[in-house]
Image (tube, grey):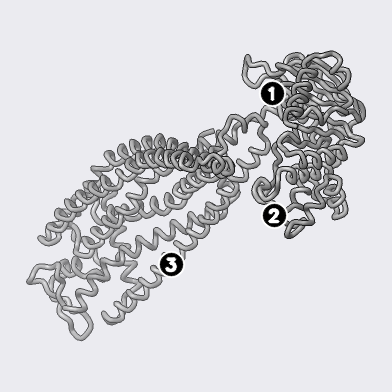
């Protein structure tokens, strides 16, 4: 499916509004064209009323006023050519008629022109010239009001469609983000992910507006004004079309260039968003290292790259307007001289009012024609954005549910890791043939050097990733055969980096468990040793914690995370170095909260401080992706292996500090 088809597919739910907007655009163009047509007869009527002399006639041809009713004093053929309110046909003896009869269809153009004139005459004709002029005024007011009314309807309905499509696109991308696997976000820049939802959708939305809103009104206006030119003088119209192939080729060439440069520009905007997001997220680090100037330099560099990319696109985009203007003006002046001289000498097939309408219509045609010339370029900008938007929407999650996935109804027996192998990139083994069990109610600690694969092991349990070899099962059921919702509902996860939202204390504790009562919230907070400090906050449970919980200390953030896990009341707990970044006092409070949380629950604990897991039922030592030791604290110390060395190293370090 093409990018155009997929982009416009988002318009389908709003077909009624689009139809209304399109019909309004068409009627707006019709009344705009009618207004231009009316200018010719109106000007001629004004000249006749004001002076009694038509300034576009030769000096000997005059129309005198008898009171307020014109009296024709020259031959009928001349009067018919000069009076826009006179319904007449061209004499058969005129050369133009001979030509018209020789070319099929041209005679019909003359009949159409005379019919339009007769229609205008019928609408405005009155007993006196002043009454006729008054009718002209009423008709013009009606046309202007109708034109602007339809213009408003067009703009309103298309604005509704535009904003609705932007909303739908952003919702679709965000929903896709929620469904994508964890590894996708490890390979994408945050700024790029954000830019797709904000900047790229905006550009694509503007292209949809151009593709429907301007396309209908501009095409219909060009068609109507072009039709006027054709029925007034097909010869001059054909002369004007000589430049059309050049313009078409130029528009195509500009469009290809703009699509290329627009893609680069959007990438550079993603760079700016990335630098900005990283700077704000790590402001504490920036301040601590006095790196403000370095960050300013990075941001300036990103904005300069965006500026240069944008400048290339703008240079190409704005090249089309002056070239189109120049070509249109040259053609217009040539036609003006050619047709004007023919009218003044009386050698052409147009009268003065026809000439006036032709010139006004021709120059009025320039604006919508210029707009059409930029539509292709704007659409190419949108297609560059669409490629980025749909690349995210089309990404397939690696973690998917099996077609016949079952729902787990609680945890009864044990978790089994069976010959598990895993790698993030081909050839880079992180886990190799790992096997062990975690029985219900058991606390199992994972220890070992950094980079050994401990966090990866616990990430496999909630299926953040799937192993390339072996399996992870709960109560004998491979977790790849169960629904993700029921699997993750069994678990509570507390990590070293605590994730809090810019919400109230209550909102963060309630996250994922919206139906808890006030007593349950307070009970969870108390068990997590958080209720005390919460009651000291300015607004207690309604206090905003700030982005990522910046208004709280590290220990307070961890205790809120534990309260959140307690409220969820999970069967299985995962602690990923939950106390490693805390000071001694905070660690004491958090460790007590963890002990409360682990009561009568199954827990997998990754520990940095080995003193915190001495009472674990089993300790598994992981090194370079393999299980090298397994046993209780006392058993592993007696073995004198890796665990014993790590423990003694930490113990000696603590003695040195003391």
Q: Are circles 1 and 3 on residues that touch, CB within 8 Å?
A: no
Number of residues whose C-alpha sits closer than 10 Å to that of mark 1, classed few (under 14), some (14–19) or many (20 or more):
few
Classify residue 24 as left or right of residue 121. right
Q: Secondary structure at mark 1?
A: loop
Above or below — where is 198 with respect to 135?
A: above
Classify residue 340 as left or right of residue 394. left
Above or below — where is 78 with respect to 516?
A: below
Q: Quadrant of the C terminus?
A: top right
Sooner in the amino-acid sequence: mark 2 or mark 3: 3
Most distant residue in the left direction: 60
Q: How many marks?
A: 3
Residue 211 locus on image (x, y percent): 45, 47
Residue 195 locus on image (x, y percent): 53, 42
Above or below — where is 643 with respect to 535?
A: above
Q: Secondary structure at mark 3?
A: helix
Residue 590 locus on image (x, y percent): 80, 40
Mark-to-mark CA distance, 1 and 2: 35 Å
Mark-to-mark CA distance, 2 and 3: 53 Å
Q: Which residue is mark 1?
A: 450
* Disc assigned to residue 544: 2
Q: Secondary structure at mark 2?
A: loop
Sooner in the amino-acid sequence: mark 1 or mark 2: 1
Mark-to-mark CA distance, 1 and 3: 75 Å
Residue 373 locus on image (x, y percent): 34, 45
* Disc assigned to residue 146: 3
Which residue is at a point 20% across and 86% down the rendered structure image? 67
Q: Quadrant of the N terminus?
A: top right
């Amino acid at each position: 499916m093409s990018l155009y088809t997929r982009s416009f597919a988002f318009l389908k739910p709003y077909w009624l509004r689009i139809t209304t907007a399109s019909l309004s655009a068409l009627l707006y163009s019709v009344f705009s064209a009618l207004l231009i047509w009316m200018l010719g007869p109106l000007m001629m009527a004004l000249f006749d009323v004001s002076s009694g002399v038509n300034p576009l006639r030769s000096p000997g041809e005059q129309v005198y006023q008898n009171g307020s009713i014109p009296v024709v004093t020259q031959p009928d053929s001349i009067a018919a050519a000069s009076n826009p309110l006179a319904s007449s046909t061209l004499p058969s003896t005129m050369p133009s008629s001979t030509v018209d009869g020789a070319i099929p269809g041209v005679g019909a153009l003359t009949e159409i022109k005379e019919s339009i004139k007769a229609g205008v005459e019928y609408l405005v004709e009155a007993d006196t010239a002043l009454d006729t002029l008054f009718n002209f005024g009423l008709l013009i007011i009606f046309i202007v009001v109708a034109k602007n009314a339809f213009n408003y309807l067009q703009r309103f309905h298309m604005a509704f469609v535009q904003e609705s499509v932007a909303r739908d696109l952003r919702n679709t991308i965000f929903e896709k983000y929620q469904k994508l696997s964890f590894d996708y976000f490890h390979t994408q820049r945050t700024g790029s992910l954000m830019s797709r939802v904000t900047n790229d959708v905006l550009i694509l939305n503007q292209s949809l507006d151009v593709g429907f809103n301007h396309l209908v009104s501009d095409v219909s206006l060009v068609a109507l004004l072009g039709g006027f030119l054709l029925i007034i003088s097909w010869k001059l119209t054909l002369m004007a079309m000589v430049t059309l192939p050049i313009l078409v080729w130029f528009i195509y060439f500009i469009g290809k260039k703009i699509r290329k440069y627009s893609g680069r520009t959007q990438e550079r905007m993603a760079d700016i968003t990335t630098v900005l997001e990283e700077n704000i997220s790590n402001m504490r680090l920036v301040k601590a290292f006095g790196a403000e100037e370095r960050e300013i330099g990075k941001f300036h560099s990103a904005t300069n790259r965006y500026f240069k990319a944008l400048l290339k696109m703008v240079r190409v985009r704005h090249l089309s307007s002056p070239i189109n203007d120049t070509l249109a003006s040259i053609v217009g002046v040539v036609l003006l001289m050619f047709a004007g001289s023919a009218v003044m000498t009386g050698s052409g097939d147009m009268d003065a009012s026809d000439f006036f309408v032709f010139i006004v219509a021709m120059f009025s045609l320039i604006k919508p024609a210029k707009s059409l010339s930029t539509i292709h370029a704007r659409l190419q900008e949108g297609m560059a954005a669409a490629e980025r938007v749909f690349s995210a929407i089309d990404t397939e999650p690696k973690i998917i549910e099996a077609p016949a996935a079952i729902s787990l109804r609680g945890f009864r027996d044990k978790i089994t890791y069976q010959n598990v192998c895993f790698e993030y990139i081909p050839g880079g083994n992180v886990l190799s043939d790992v096997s062990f069990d975690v029985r219900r109610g058991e606390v199992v600690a994972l220890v070992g050097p950094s980079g050994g694969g401990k966090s990866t092991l616990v990430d496999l349990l909630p299926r953040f990733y799937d192993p390339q070899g072996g399996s992870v099962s709960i109560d004998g059921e491979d977790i790849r055969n169960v629904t993700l919702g029921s699997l993750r509902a069994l678990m509570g996860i507390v990590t070293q980096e605590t994730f809090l939202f810019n919400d109230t204390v209550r909102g963060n504790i309630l996250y994922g468990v919206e139906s808890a009562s006030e007593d349950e919230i307070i009970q969870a907070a108390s068990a997590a040793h958080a209720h005390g400090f919460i009651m000291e906050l300015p607004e207690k449970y309604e206090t905003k914690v700030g982005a990522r919980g910046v208004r709280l200390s590290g220990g307070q953030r961890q205790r809120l995370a534990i309260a959140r896990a307690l409220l969820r009341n999970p069967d299985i707990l995962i602690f990923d170095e939950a106390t490693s970044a805390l000071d001694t006092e905070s660690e004491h409070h958090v460790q007590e909260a963890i002990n409360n949380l682990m009561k009568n629950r199954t827990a997998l604990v990754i520990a940095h401080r080995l003193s915190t897991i001495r009472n674990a039922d089993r300790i598994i030592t992981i090194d370079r992706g393999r299980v090298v030791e397994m046993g209780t604290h006392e058993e592993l110390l007696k073995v004198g292996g890796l665990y014993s060395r790590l423990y003694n190293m930490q113990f000696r370090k603590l003695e040195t500090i003391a």
